[in-house]
Amino acid sequence: MSGFAKPLKIALGLIVIAGLIVIPMNFNRYGLFILSQWAVMTIAAMGLNLTLGYAGQVSLAQGAFVGIGAYASAIMTTHGWPLPAAIVVAIVLAFAVGWVLGYPALRVQHHYLAFVTLAFSTLAFLVFRNESWLTGGIYGISNIPRPHVFGIATNKPLPFYYVCLGSLAIVSVAVWWLIRSPWGRAFMALRENPLRAQSLGIDTRRYTLMAFAIGSALGGVAGALYAPLTQYIDPVPFNLSLSLDLLMMVIVGGAGFYFGPFLGAMIAVLLPEWLRFTEGYYLMLYAIAVMGLLIWSPTGILGILDRYMAARRTKAASALRAVAKSRLETAQ
Amino acid sequence: MSNLFDLLVAGLATGAIYALVAVGFTLLWQTSQTINFAQGEFVMLPAFLMLAAMHVGAPFWLAIILGILLSMLLLGLAFKMLLVDPMMRHGVLPLAIATMALAIGIKEAVKQFFSAEASPFPSIVPTGDISILGHAVSLQSIGVLVLAILAVFGLTALLNRTSLGHQMQAAAQNPTVARIIGVPVERMILLTFLINAFLVALASLLITPIYLAKFSSGEVLGQAAFIAAIVGGFNQVRGAIAGGLLIGVLDNLAAAYVSTQYRAAVPMIFLIVVILFRPQGLLGRAEERTV
């Protein structure tokens, strides 16, 4: 996005944010639910983007962390705890489990790591399903309450949409800050060349574990919001396909791009809804669209933009060079 | 003990089918670094192609041939040309994601164009029981086991004893050198895709009579084959075979002796342990790559 002038970028950002606040005001219940889901999934995908896109560690377990957060939040709020406390517990829990899951990444990389996390994801699903004393088993947990924010009840769809949007805003700012901090740079060093990173004195061991733990914690946040959003959870939404969906969001949006997860979640959550008019064909068309997009641009949607910008910059630079050259020649 | 014997036979029969699918999976990885997340759906689809052929009036034997040919065309040729070729040079991950989307696409297409319900599928081996050493053993299990073992032996013979097989191994191990000494690498890669399509069609033919034809049946199968391939050794055909048999037996024993609830956890835990302590797989080699 560096091709735009800064004021233009800020103006664009403000318009999008204003749009997200104002336009949904006259949406119906279902539209607001889908938009809230988009905000929640974006948070989870941002976490995965941190682990995968910035630190280069493949994880097929983000869905499991959404599940951990959702169950933590559902169990606590149905027992009378306030949602913020549940979110804190979800973060701590997902962070701790994510940290432990990071250990295999110290031993194995790439596809092997993907398989370990895949196995973990399935194990987590089995725990959600079978430990019914805690999770309600296949019957799930119902009547999950929604919070009061500044004394306003969020039982109606619109206020809760603002809760999701506000959370997304907080997470976005935190991630923005994180990837510009020395930590973010260390993550990227880990992705680009772990050996060189280590020789420069970066504790790759610690940062690998951190990349997993922080990414997972954001999955936990998303889960903690998902539970009050649907007000009923059972194990099915947190099976392996959620992890695969989240991975798809990150790659389709553009892994390693800050805005990738926003667009990826938009494609994964909203595109199937827009295609609903085709009835039974909508998921088929969605699959074809994803494949087509990846064939066109394997680096995702933002990869297209990135290449366009790069091409424009090269063009501008060579034009400048040509001018400079002709000036040089006339001076001689 | 008779219970254990039955479990072993049933486990080996499903394991042999997992092995077929896992072998195809490793072949694709070997020659083109394709991690095919749609492999389970690849097994699900041919049964429906055969059912469709029978629906328009073809006899069972003709339907089988048509089904295998069609799946080689769609899951071999078209899969390679339309999806793998354009994406191969961009790395492992985007292609893996594209195959995930393909899995959704195949599943939805079957659900939409065929049926969302499970359909029965005729068995190519006779059903019933025979008595071996005083045990009643299902003929279907034995038939499946024999056919799968024959297919695997045929493939190993092709890879190790023929010139074509040697060329395929060369193309997988070192494409650059293989090209220099005159191996048509592109054609060899295409051949592995066709072999994979044949193997999944065969697996489909063998497993569908047991589990019925259903659009969602690929998920479990794909995962089992996946685990079998990794446990056995991602870079070895014989590793994938051993892995398949092992996972089949383990799965059946776990269902009987652990708990039905945590049955699926046993192969997963096994997988994690193998990857952490022997990442190259039980039979795999650490560095070099072989078919």
Image: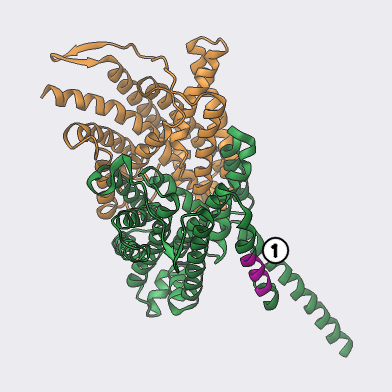
Chain colours: A green, B orange
Residue appearing at x 70%, y 63% in the figure: A308
**Chain where mark 1 sits:** A
Classify residue B245 by image quadrant: top left
Quarter the C terminus of chain A occupies: bottom right
Q: Is residue A16 magenta?
A: yes
Q: Nearer the viewer, residue A327 or A240?
A: A240
| B276 relative to A167 in the view: left or right | left
So how many labels did they put on this image?
Answer: 1
In front: B111, or B275? Answer: B111
Does the magenta stretch mainly form a helix, a strand or a loop?
Answer: helix
Q: In this view of the protein, can residue A254 be seen by the observer?
A: no
Return the residue found at the far right.
A330
Q: Which residues are magenta?
A: A10-18
Q: Is residue A182 above or below residue A57?
A: below
Residue assigned mark 1: A308
- Residue A203: where, in percent of width, then height? 34, 75
In the picture, the quarter occupied by the N terminus of chain A is bottom right
Q: Residue at x 15, y 27 (%)?
A: B4
Q: Residues within 10 Å of mark 1 (few under 14, many from 20)?
A: few
Q: Is residue B139 magenta?
A: no
From what the image shows, is residue B156 above or below residue B226? above
Q: Identify the amino acid type marked 1.
A: Tyr
**Which residue appears at 35% of the width and 14% of the height?**
B125
Residue at 60% x, 63% y is: A21
Relative to A69, say whether B223 is above or below: above
Image coordinates of residue B155 in percent, x first then y, are 40, 30
Residue B179 location in percent, x, y? 55, 47
Give the image location of residue A196, x and y in percent: 42, 74
In which image quadrant can residue A237 be found? Answer: top left
B44 relative position to B240: left or right:
right
